[in-house]
Amino acid sequence: MLCAFFLVTDFFLKKHTNHNQLISLPNLLGKTFQEVHNTLNSLNLNYQLVDKNIRDYNPNFQIGAVTSQDPYPGEKVKEGRSIYLTLNAEKIPLTAFPNISDKPFRYAKSILESVNLKVGKIFYKNDIAENVILKSEFDGFLIKKSDSIPIFSSVDLYIGTGDPRNQFQFKVPKLEGLLFQDAENLLKENFLNLGDIYIDGLVSDSLNLIVYKQSRRSTNTIQTFYFSSKAKAPSVDVWLTNDISKINN
């Protein structure tokens, strides 16, 4: 009888104190601080924030949103456990615009990327200097060496077309099967712009979207684009998905 009493008592004590009850940690990435506070509070979990003075800015998340968590989503934790959170920087850092004037396009592109900037729209312009940067713009305004600009910004570039005037020759690369980021980069490498983006309705991973269709068919045949004194480079629309089976359809 005494043994049975202790067994029953132990059972109820464990049940009352949630002994061995584990909580599956939710995915907090991308959520605001208030959303995270409410979620963790409802689960009887604590949290600690990484010092704001050492936070980096992540362009994949909104300002102030959670960019990392420890433990990871889906891990089992006990009530009262502290979850370590990193919030995105509250301000987008600035960088000094590098000197890319009169530089070859691909070299200028690598310089921009080295300071966390990217090529925006490409414009063709009549000039004897073929594929050389003639002018750079940010938000429609001329930008020059050492001007301050937010990191991860897109910079529009004007490139010379060489001779003959009023035309530019290009090839359309194959984009199907590429990650969106790689497809966009390949277009720029071929002096073309990214056009409209159409995303499949069933998206499970926005950071790993794949191109399954493009508006201009890829070809090894050289095409000629005719314009007056300057014009925006031709663009290619893309259709994106997480469903790999769509790529060959």
Image (cartoon, rainbow, N blue to C red):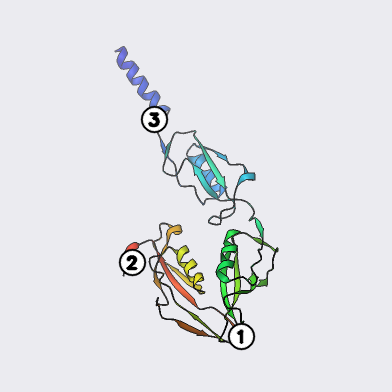
- Residue 246, labelled with which disc? 2
**Amino acid type at mark 1:** Ser
Give the CA separation, mark 3 to mark 2: 45 Å
- Residue 89, labelled with which disc? none
- The quarter of the rendered structure image containing the C terminus is bottom left
Q: Residue at x 56, y 45 (%)?
A: 86
Q: How many marks?
A: 3
Q: Nearer the viewer, mark 3 or mark 2?
A: 2
**Amino acid type at mark 3:** Asn
Q: Which residue is mark 1?
A: 229
Label 1 neighbourhood size at 10 Å, few (<14), some (14-19), many (20+)? Answer: few
Residue 5 location, x and y as percent? 33, 16
**Amino acid type at mark 2:** Lys
Please give left or right for residue 22 compared with residue 35 in the image: left
- The quarter of the rendered structure image containing the N terminus is top left
Residue 125 location, x and y as percent? 60, 81
